[in-house]
Image: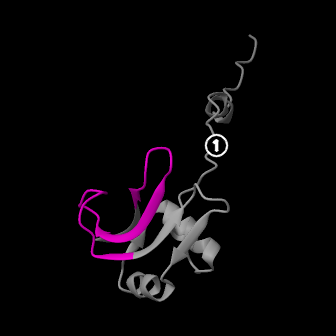
Amino acid sequence: MLKIRLTRIGKNKQPSFRVVLQEHTSPVKGKFIEELGYYRPASTPKEVKFELDRVKHWLKMGAQPSDTIAVLLKKQGIENMDQFIAPRNKKTRNKKAPAEAAPAVPAAPAA
């Protein structure tokens, strides 16, 4: 399966990322099929550039974006990226909730 994901480049404490198309089993810093853009979060303001026509082409061909790439593409105006974005506001389970949901045992009548 093909993935659109980030690969880190840049110096220490100055992150820069390439947006690349890779096979999902290849290492993050390994070979890639095509470079689709870049992301520079350290610059002010943050720089994001995609080759949108190529990204749309690969999405139609079945490539899946990573969670971070899906968020960036959604900000660029690409539709239907919500399905690739993992839920971020996971609620913590309350341990008392299952006990309260248990059916109450009726009290035995006094004899």
Q: State the image coordinates of residue 109 (x, y, percent, origin top left).
A: 74, 18
Foreground residue, 30 or 15?
15
Q: Quadrant of residue 54?
A: bottom left
Residue drawn at 54 percent across, 61 percent down = 40
32 drawn magenta = yes
Q: Residue at x 64, y 43 (%)?
A: 91
Q: Which residue occupies the foreground of this view, 98 or 26?
A: 26
- Judge from the rendering whether residue 80 lies leftward or rightward of residue 29; answer left or right: right
Q: Badge 1: how crowded within 10 Å, few (<14), some, or many (20+)? A: few
Tally the numbered discs. Answer: 1
Picture quadrant where residue 111 is located: top right
Give yes or no for residue 96 being in the magenta stretch: no
Q: Which residue is mark 1?
A: 91
Q: Which of the two residues, 65 or 96, is positioned nearer the viewer here?
A: 65
Which residue: 37% across, 70% down?
A: 20
- Element at label 1: loop
The residue range painted magenta reads 7-35
Q: Residue 35 at x, y = what percent?
A: 36, 75
